Amino acid sequence: MWYVIQTLGGEEERAANMIRRQIPHYYMEECFVPKRERMKKFHGSWNKVEEILFRGYVFVASQTPERLYQELKKIPKLTKMLGREKDIYFPLNELEERMVRGIGDKEHKTVLSKIEIDEGKQIRVTEGPLKDYVRNVVRVNLHKREVAVQVKFMGKTVELFMGVELVNE
């Protein structure tokens, strides 16, 4: 099961590296920071860059959340395990985990989705992870080459920003 660790924004990779180094592997199967690809313009040309998908969060797969929590307490001020009530730990629910798995690849990276814009300014996704979430698009920012998608995460409705590539430019 996947558990979510809260950390300072901008410190996700540092926290994940500390977790991987300091917590024995038998308390966690995997520790990762989901990323997204997006296009960014540098010196007049578009370049593919990677950014954090869920700012302030690190994901850990574990079958022993109680022990994981005890081990996380040894990591100084960088982490807080979410979904804890007294001595019960709640993982991401099945739909949330499926969503994170579905938009990411094996390295938990959300690749660019290819889109076309029709005459009515409607987007049509030709390929990529956005295909399953086109109904959830709440904003399109073609200048930044990204769309905001509304999803459920940790029991709340949040906006995820996914990178897009225009194929009919």
Image: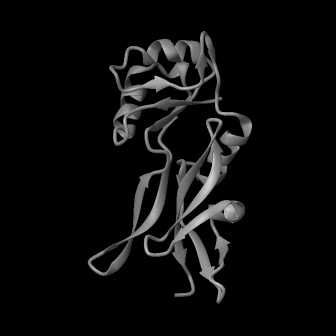
Q: Nearer the viewer, residue 77 or 65?
A: 77
Q: Residue 87 appears at what percent x and percent y?
A: 61, 10
Tell me the quarter of the picture where residue 14 sits: top left
* Residue occupying image coordinates x 60% and y 76%: 115
Tell me the quarter of the picture where residue 48 sits: bottom left
Q: Residue 65 appears at what percent x and percent y?
A: 59, 18
* Residue occupying image coordinates x 46% and y 19%: 24
Q: Residue 144 appears at what percent x and percent y?
A: 43, 70
Q: Residue 88 appears at what percent x and percent y?
A: 64, 14
Residue 123 higher or lower than 87, as above or below: below
Left or right: 14 with respect to 137?
left
Left or right: 155 with respect to 142?
right
Label total for image: 0
Tell me the quarter of the picture where residue 12 sits: top left
* Residue occupying image coordinates x 63% and y 61%: 129
* Residue occupying image coordinates x 26% and y 78%: 43
Residue 52 higher or lower than 153, as above or below: below
Q: Check the picture and name the quadrant holding the N terminus.
A: top right
Instruction: Please say which color scheme the image uses.
Output: one colour
Q: Nearer the viewer, residue 92 or 139?
A: 139
Residue 43 higher or lower than 97, as above or below: below
